[in-house]
Amino acid sequence: METFSKLKKYYWPYKKHFFTSMFFLLFVTAITVVYPVILQLTIDEVVLKGQFAWIPLLAFGFIGIMIFKGVATFIQQYTGDLFGIKSVYSMRNALYEKLQYLPFRYYDNAKTGDLMSRLTADVESFRFFLSFGFSELFRFVLMLTVSFSMMFYYSVPLTFATMISLPFLFVSVYKFDRAVHPAFRGVRKSFGKLNTNVQENLSGINTVKSLSREEFQTGKFNHSNADYKDQMIFTSNIWAKYFPLMELLGNVCVLALLSYGGYLVINSSLTPGELVAFYSLVGYILFPIMNLGFTINMFSQSKASGERLLEILEAKEEIFDTDNAINPPRLQGDVEFKHVTLRYAGDDNEALKDVSFKAEPGKIIGLIGATGSGKTSITQLITRFYEPVSGEVLIDGKNVKDYSLKALRSNIGFVHQESFLFSSTIKANIAYGKPDATMEQIIDSAKRADAHEFIMELEEGYDTILGERGLGLSGGQKQRISIARSICLDPSILILDDATSAVDMETEFKIQEALRNVMKGRTTFIIAHRISSLKHADEILVLEEGKVVERGTHAHLLNNKGPYERIFNIQFQDRETILQGQRG
């Protein structure tokens, strides 16, 4: 029950619905156990004694009781559903909010499909137990308590004789619970992997088709599906083994009842009506106990789901606002790294090693180097996506930890290498970071990113709704909208992470010309593989294996005869080779 205790804050605020449901369940149970009494009176006092005039009265009384039970059952089930639905509404909101604030380190290892499974299937499994499981457990306790009391009232010896196999039945139920819980946890994990497989395939469907890997993806899915199937079969095998055993033990109770009960009736120690009532009461005990397997099934599934939900809710938020975090309306953009070292979780290698540099407000800093050299890591420390293991990252003379995350990131425009657009209008995508942006600001941002022209060629213009992840636009068009989104934010610091990699040379030139005006008065970091994108930078940092191995202007670095000149010669040689091929 530790899992339910930890999740209590999400369902306990709605306890009034739970207690209302339990209150009416008490009425429903009380009415249910009246049936055997009515049967006993009908047989012993009416049928055997020939008092048939009582039959209409008993019939009307029985109908009245049924109507009352129907109303009570409706209220009990409705309020029970309200308890579960409102609880998971609160929980789902908390889960989604938690996912928004978890650090990049968490998503480095998380699988999107698995997270989707937790927010849907696992939440629904937990809701089902809140709505029905708790009431079933309460019903079980009530039925056993009341039924046993009435059975002892009718005949103590028959009660003990009938319940001879009950201890074995409870042991079977206990062993069933011990076996089925880990089985259901395996089912949930397998389902999460299956979801991940589907999500990744649909997200990368263009890549799959372009490389003719449909057969491979089908095989990969079949493997995940087979694992899920095997987990379900394993769980079903547990059910198949334990439920017949529990049914057998229940039938032993019925056999003992009919044998010894019949003997008592023959010897006039028990009336026929009392034997029939006793048989009904035994059913009220056996069926809840056998149904306990179903309830335990619900409990096991919800417990396994609750554990998976807690893994998200209890995940550590490594990056958060300090108690005295400051909220300046606008940063000047003075960025400084002091002996910064960065290591990613699960990686013994250092992504950055003792990096130090200073970028004054309004300056343009170029970052160049091979893949994995640490270029993007520098920019991710500026935005506090990650924390350095040593050293300091300063903006305007203050550690980035001193700023609130909202104030810090609202002053930084980040254009990622892989552009992501939401399934919304182009207008909404550009204004995403600044929801109160005017149409004039949106259009101006698009013009600066060289996106206005192609947007206006679309039938709906800025009101065009983009497909999922921006499908329907070319890579260059998506990237230009992404650039416009950052420009619209009017940031003090602009980070372009290889932002023109998906556009042709002509478009790159146009965007760079437009960005020159945007960069004025802003500290800009440009990550690029093309030297043409960095030539105008005030300072260029050349990185190798997490270290700054060279720095200076374009002209200085060319004269330095170092790594930068080597990169330049390679790119220039490639260009000459292309030109010679065109001449030939």
Image (cartoon, grey):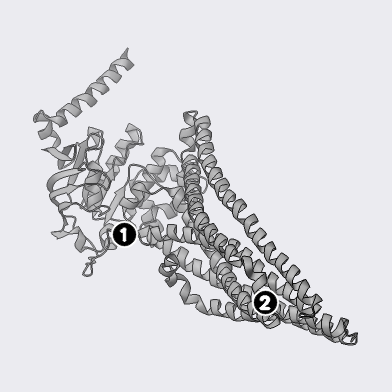
Marked residue nearer the N-terminal end (2 or 1) = 2
Left-right relation of 369 to 273: left
Q: Position of residue 278 (x, y in %)?
A: 72, 75
Q: Is residue 236 above or below residue 435?
A: above
Q: Residue at x 63, y 75 (%)?
A: 143
Q: Is residue 438 visible?
A: no
Question: How many marks are shown on the rendered structure?
Answer: 2
In contact (CB < 8 Å): disc 2 and disc 1: no
Q: What crowding class fits label 1: few (fewer than 14 Cα within 10 Å), some (14-19), or many (20 or more)?
A: few
Q: Is residue 498 visible?
A: yes
Please tell me in which quadrant of the rendered image residue 527 appears.
top left
| Extreme residue in the top direction | 584
Q: Which residue is mark 1?
A: 316
570 or 36: nearer the viewer: 36
Please tell me in which quadrant of the rendered image residue 50 appears.
bottom right
Q: Secondary structure at mark 1?
A: loop
325 or 540: nearer the viewer: 325
Q: Residue at x 23, y 62 (%)?
A: 330
Q: Position of residue 583 (x, y in %)?
A: 31, 14
Q: The disc labelled 1 sits on which kind of residue?
A: Lys
Q: Which residue is mark 2?
A: 157
Q: The disc labelled 2 sits on which kind of residue?
A: Pro
User: Which quadrant of the figure contains the N terminus?
Assistant: bottom left
Q: Is residue 546 above or below residue 324?
A: above
Q: Secondary structure at mark 2?
A: helix
Q: Residue at x 48, y 71 (%)?
A: 11
Which of the two marks, 2 or 1, is nearer to us in this view?
Answer: 2
| Extreme residue in the front direction | 267
Q: Position of residue 52 (x, y in %)?
A: 90, 85
Residue 206 circle label: none
Q: Position of residue 260 (x, y in %)?
A: 73, 71
The answer for how far apart the CA atoms under marks 2 and 1 are is 59 Å
